[in-house]
Image (cartoon, grey):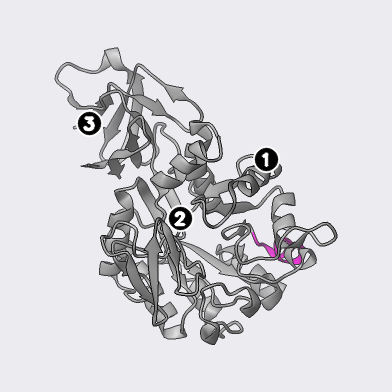
Amino acid sequence: MPTYLTNGRFFDGDSIHEGKAIVINDNKIADIINASDVPADAEVVDLNGQLLAPGFIDVQVNGGGGVLLNEEPTVGGIRRIAAAHRRFGTTTMLPTMVSDEWTVMEAVGEATADALKHGVAGVRGVHFEGPYLSKARKGVHNEAVIREVDAQALTLFSRKDMGVVVTTLAPEEVSPNFINRLTDEDVIVCAGHTAGTYDDARRGLNAGITGFTHLFNAMTPFTSREPGMVGAALEDADSWCGLIVDGYHVHDASLRVAIAAKAKGKMMLVTDAMPTVGAKNKEFTLYGESIVARDGRCATSDGTLAGSDLDMASAVRNTVRRLGLPVEEALRMASLYPARFLGLDKEIGRITADYDADLVLLDDDLTVTATWIGGKAEFY
């Protein structure tokens, strides 16, 4: 029996509408009708005038709910991470592994495949952030596990049972042929944790790179005579950039300039979230070192940023309040644009007929009050 979502506004991916009802049947959006046409005996959910939007899509989630993927690469671990982020509007996520030993990479691959097999809500793939990175721009990644490409890497990344696969690498540390072979296997390749020059970036883009991981962070900056990785990212009209809008990773003014410079529709919100998101305990261990989140900032004892304590709902609010973008654009940066980046924009990222019923309900403060994944609702 279909469910009708009524008495609310809804953002379809383009604009906000009123006076409509969203019809959910099984796991899909079946139709959008006038609210006056809802049958008298229908199963109705009253949205209480709140804003319904496409569910948020986060392509970089290291942890949540007290779980770090590297430390718990299991179906149970992935389920807890996804559940923690769902509370903040994330209905699609890629569990993300930071650089680690080969055995951990294999375990993450197996856990992701099992999570998809068992239908863990919200999981559509995996992101391997490293280990084929620049030691000079490693950030919090462990230098001891950063290395040249493993012989089995192409086989692991090319598995077809892991959903959408993203990998972040330093283009100057791998061959263009390796990037090209990954893209031939439908792996989405991003540049990140890179000391590469503008020319290195262009070679990587020409080989198939389509994204830049947490723009500005852990990459060569934009300067007058060397545009660097940041300059290449902003210049390129076809690639996507992930932005961590938390007030710590990048200055608000730098974010505003970057968004203005980049081709429209190519900036997407990410969290780079750590286990502290959705957890009471604001301390965890990474590579045996204690990481503490204070006032939303995750860092080591020496102050090095170590992921974030950011959730997607906060990222959307920050984009509106700190950066001054319209709420519609902030929502697109959290849903439609990452859907396009992942090649899933015919399934998610919009509220329209035949799309998956992955939705988020927001009050006037842009706080999440309900989510739907595959038509199944949770209210908060």
Q: Amino acid at mark 3?
A: Pro
**Which residue is pictured at 41% across the width and 85% down the height?**
103
Q: SS at mark 2?
A: loop
**Which residue is pictured at 65% across the width and 65% down the height?**
219
Residue interval drawn in magenta: 202-209
**263 and 154: which is toward the camera:** 263
The vertical placement of 112 against 325, above or below, is below
Q: Amino acid at mark 1?
A: Ala
**Which residue is pictured at 29% across the width and 61% down the height?**
65
Q: Please give the residue where the numbered disc 1 appears in the rendered image.
A: 260
Q: Mark 1 or mark 2, which has the lower sequence index?
A: 1
Which of the numbered marks, if any, corresponds to residue 2? Answer: 3
Q: What secondary structure characterizes most of the magenta part?
A: helix
Residue 100 percent across, percent down from the top left? 47, 80
The vertical placement of 93 against 19, above or below, is below
Q: CA distance from mark 1 to mark 3?
A: 42 Å
Q: Dot 2, crowdedness within 10 Å: few (<14), some or many (≥20)?
A: many
**290 and 199: which is toward the camera:** 290
Identify the image quadrant of the N terminus.
Answer: top left
Residue 23 percent across, percent down from the top left? 29, 28
Identify the image quadrant of the C terminus.
Answer: top left
Q: Mark 1 or mark 3, which has the lower sequence index?
A: 3
Evaluate whether residue 282 shows in this view.
yes
* Relative horizontal placement of residue 173, taking residue 198 as reference (left or right): left
**84 and 119: which is toward the camera:** 84
Q: Dot 3, crowdedness within 10 Å: few (<14), some or many (≥20)?
A: some
Q: Amino acid at mark 2?
A: Thr
* Relative horizontal placement of residue 80, taking residue 349 as reference (left or right): left
Residue 378 percent across, percent down from the top left? 22, 43
**Which residue is pictured at 77% across the width and 63% down the height?**
198
Q: Please give the residue where the numbered disc 2 appears in the rendered image.
A: 271
Which residue ends up furthest to the left in the rendered image? 41
